[in-house]
Amino acid sequence: MELGADHIDIELKAAHEFNNFLHGNKPGKCKVIISSHNYDSTPPIEDLGNLVARIQAAGADIIKFATTALDITDVARVFQITVHSQVPIIAMVMGERGLMSRILCPKFGGYLTFGSLEAGQVSAPGQPTIEELVNLYNFRLLEPDTKVFGIIGNPVSHSKSPKLYNEAFKSVGFNGVYLHLLVDDVQKFFRTYSSMDFAGFRTYSSMDFAGFSVTIPHKEAALACCDEVDPVAKSIGAVNCVVRRPDGKLFGCNTDYVGAISSIEDGLLGSQNGSTGTGSPLAGKLFVVIGAGGAGKALAYGAKEKGARVLIANRTYDRARELADLVGGQALSLAELDNFRPEKGMILANTTSIGMHPKVNETPISKEALANYMLVLNAVYTPKITRLLREAAESGAQIVTGVDMFIGQAYEQYERFTGLPAPKEQFKKIMEN
Ligand code: NAP
């Protein structure tokens, strides 16, 4: 039905009572949904309020509007509208940056959401599949007081973290959901989702945006957004985990190094048949880190903390030198690494993307040089067994995969997010599939 409202596209739809459908009855009464689509942007909150009032005045039983997310913070305005609506409301923010609006509608008072039957067969941009809504994000379990977690990154849609955490949340009955969060401006993200105003609604709170994993390229910027930062993360200059404390403040830490270092320690302890002695099995070992980026820094600080002697080998020598100076270690250019064979029994950690899919034939060090290492870790996790790890194993070294490292950092984050012990076996199984 055309109601002649300038740029608003008004439709009339019959929404039959769901139970009537289920029982094969004719609907007793049809309801009117009046909808508006904005394919360019998400207007300011006053304009959204006016739009909703006009739709309501036009006789809607159910209000529907869809806008377009230019930034993930656009979704916050839409949540504020749905929470305060007196009339049943369907409100979606289109595009990947608006994904959260489609998943969290049970939390913020939305009447329903849309899902596609098959990936890529969407009726509007950013629509997840029914399978993703129900099985990946546990849509049917979400409630107003469900806590929100997620991975902040760009790009981020490839991340397996939502699968890992949501399955674990469901299995222990933890009332939380973990989302893919495509973020462009991390400071704006934290500012917006720390201060959403739900005046008069005790059930809804900015506090419910409870914890975040942070990945490329936001690890350094996220640190600057935290009210308090763990001293090791401060030294590394990057956080990959941000937790909201009970007082609302943001606490940042770095679990990348915890995951990698504990996986290496487990490997070394395993090879010593459990004879631990006291302290870390890394103490006194020569620990060679290839790379001086975020993961390289995390490994270098972690190794230093455990009492290892650290050497950094990097393509850009000056960056190796800079990091080596910070951790009191030595520096080499990557080209010199093959001939660096001062002793047997060293530890090697590759933190560059060399050997990552699709360039799976590349490797940062020759097989001959690997004979001097007792354990080799590769941060790369696609593929799980890289050429570096295959050749290290053939040379007699123990190997630790990027998947082991990833799972290790995820245990730590899960425990910080939930206060519960991480379901370690379940995490391993999920990552293996
Ligand atoms: P980053 O900060 O961008 O650092 C990249 C490092 O790799 C730099 O030292 C860079 O050297 C070096 N590099 C890049 N391409 C190279 C090439 N073709 N040849 C030689 N050196 C090269 O990245 P990041 O955050 O540290 O991540 C690095 C890798 O670790 C990625 O593959 C990431 O997926 C992985 N990672 C895995 C986990 C896990 O849980 N498994 C966690 C974090 C990161 P220059 O200084 O010369 O540019």
Image (tube, helix red, strand yellow):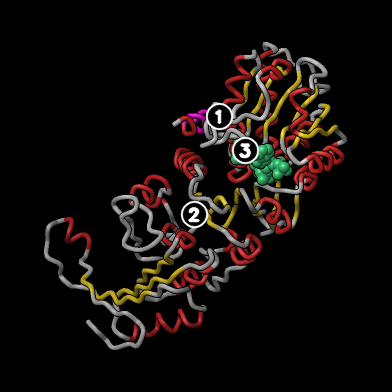
| Residue 210 located left or right of residue 143 | right
- Split into quadrants, the picture shows ligand 1 in the one at top right
Q: First in sequence: mark 3 or mark 1? A: 3
The amino acid type found where label 3 is placed reads: Ser
In terms of depth relative to the viewer, which is nearer, 364 or 131?
364
Depth check: give the residue in front, 77 or 188. Answer: 188
Residue under pointer 1: 361
Q: Quadrant of residue 415?
A: top right
Report the Cα–Cα distance between label 2 and label 3: 37 Å
Could you say which disc has been placed on residue 146 in the image?
A: 2
Q: Amino acid at mark 2?
A: Thr
- Circle 2 Cα neighbour tier, 10 Å, few/some/many (<14 / 14–19 / ≥20): many
* Label 2: which secondary element: loop
Q: Residue 424 lies in what quarter of the image?
A: top right
Q: Is mark 1 within 8 Å of ligand 1?
A: no
**Residue 344 rendering spot, x and y as whole percentages:** 77, 15
